[in-house]
Image (tube, rainbow, N blue to C red):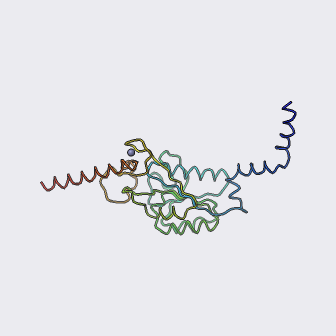
Amino acid sequence: MGYVFAYPIFFRYFCTDNPIRNRITQNMYSERDSQSPIQRRGTIEVVCGSMFSGKTEELIRRMKRAQFAKQKVEIFKPAIDVRYSELEVVSHNHNSIISTPVDSAASILLLAEDVEVVGIDEAQFFDMAIIDVCRKLASRGIRVIVAGLDMDYKGVPFGPMPALMAIADDVFKAHAICVRCGNLANFSHRTVESTRQVLLGETEKYEPLCRHCFEEAAKELIYQVEENIFKEEE
Ligand SMILES: [Zn+2]
């Protein structure tokens, strides 16, 4: 009996021009619909976090989804980041996507002609001009996805990242796992002595830590420095 009654509803839902079905279908394909030529509008998304938090994986995931939606995508990264490969954005798990190394933020504006989605990796290494570049790209109707370290090894906001987070439409903070206690980590602790803000290509010299363990590690470092000074004085 139920089947007999259900059949006309089934027929009406799937085989006629049903406004409810149309709405559901639109939501299911929101990736494409929101970027269709008529509705396309520029946005800025920031994906940030500590080292080993998976922020580059998240950038690659979003770029690949855009590629599946047949959108024209382009990824840029600072030319100084030559960790593994000149041409590819490579994350720690080797899930990679082709990218263009650029010397300055301004070059992105020139190279991003006729692109629907622009990805920017390691944005913390760019100069402050990157903020205006992202704003201009979004004004052109481009979806801009920016990934980068939110803090340096001292826990200080890194380069243009805080300003990019402020002007973004959406901010996603990725977390690593604290190697000392297993809690969520948002600090990149440097395990070797150096006061340079950037130690490129030396990821093994960092460990992700939570706030508590990061503060403890900072205290250990102060003790070590005091001990060294004490030894030198002896
Ligand atoms: Zn911890």
Q: Is residue 185 visible?
A: yes
Q: Quadrant of residue 151?
A: bottom left
Q: Is residue 95 above or below residue 200?
A: above
Give 164 or 23, whichever is nearer the viewer. Answer: 23
| Residue 90 appears left or right of 212 | right
Give the quadrant of ligand 1: top left
Residue 38 image-quadrant placement: bottom right
Dividing the image into 4 quarters, which one contains the C terminus? Answer: bottom left
Which residue is drawn at the image coordinates 68% and 57% (left, top)?
Answer: 34
Counting from the top left corner in percent of width and height, residue 18 is at 83, 49
Q: Is residue 205 left or right of residue 234?
A: right
Residue 90, can we see it? no
- Residue farthest top in this picture: 1
Describe residue 141's horizontal placement relative to residue 102 as left or right: right
| Image position, residue 104 (x, y; %) | 48, 67
Q: Nearer the viewer, residue 201 or 154?
A: 154
